[in-house]
Amino acid sequence: TEVLAAQHLRSIRDVLGPLAMGGQLGGAENATRVALLTGSMTAGQKKQVRAEIASGQVGIVIGTHALLQEAVDFHNLGMVVVDEQHRFGVEQRDQLRAKAPAGITPHLLVMTATPIPRTVALTVYGDLEPSTLRELPLGRQPIAANVIFVKDKPAWLNRAWRRINEEAAAGRQCYVVAPRIDESDDTDVQGGVRPSATAEGLFSRLRSAELAELRLALMYGRLSADDKDAAMAAFRAGEVDVLV
């Protein structure tokens, strides 16, 4: 998603520091530039980024499926990294690798927490060398996971909302994740039960009831790029207590 791509952009710039400031004041002597290319960018923005990619001004490009467009021409593609590999088809990966100069096959690194069967088979038969990340990120705190069967213990859900209020009062932030955006996404499930926990419905209810004292923001894929950026920026800045 575009939100994930933007997060990768910030992370890589933070990790590289002066090495990601090519042509900028304070950049390292051997610095490069890092650019973002997504489908929601304006035509002018995409044209400028594509030109910088083709000229080699940008050494690291982060993007969504917009990178697959024929108009995207890499100066000298040497490595392709695919995050959330299970959402990226084989043909799409090959299409991206084909953007390398003639006769050159770029290195390929795919990342996923839920590998597709084909990927598992490739690792088993030696056609793909696996690397396993077994350690938690530095500073990661223990996580307690609980499942609430609301039908049997409805009071437990109320306790969950109280816990969110308690965490927010302590200066921490929370997510509330819904399985659907709105009722148009809703479909009957086994037994004829229609889930009512949509993102829009939860947001409307929580900000007027259980979490009325907190600052809430709504975030989902159908929002415009500006609205998504605004919601994420407010959450990062600590201006939002709960992101739905």
Image (tube, rainbow, N blue to C red):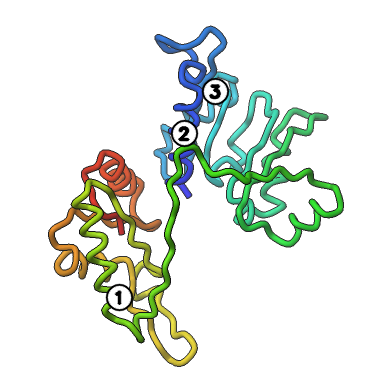
- Dot placed on the residue nearer the N-terminal end, 3 or 1: 3
Which residue occupies the foreground of this view, 235 or 229? 235
Determine the secondary structure under disc 1: helix
Query: As shown in the figure, which amino acid type bears the numbered disc 2?
Result: Ser
Quadrant for the C terminus in the image:
bottom left
Camera-side mark, 2 or 1 = 1
Does 37 sit above or below residue 189? Answer: above
Does 146 sit above or below residue 226? Answer: below
Which residue occupies the foreground of this view, 75 or 199? 199
State the residue position of label 1.
Answer: 156
Query: As shown in the figure, which amino acid type bears the numbered disc 3?
Result: Val
Which residue occupies the foreground of this view, 48 or 149? 149
Q: CA distance from mark 2 to mark 1?
A: 37 Å
Residue 74: percent from the left, percent from the top? 63, 29
State the residue position of label 2.
Answer: 11
Q: Are marks 3 and 2 in contact (CB under 8 Å)?
A: no
Q: Residue at x 79, y 46 (%)?
A: 128
Residue 115: percent from the left, percent from the top? 67, 57
Q: Residue at x 28, y 44 (%)?
A: 230
Residue 7: name its quadrant: top left
State the residue position of label 3.
Answer: 58
- Dot placed on the residue nearer the N-terminal end, 2 or 1: 2
Q: Residue at x 42, y 68 (%)?
A: 146
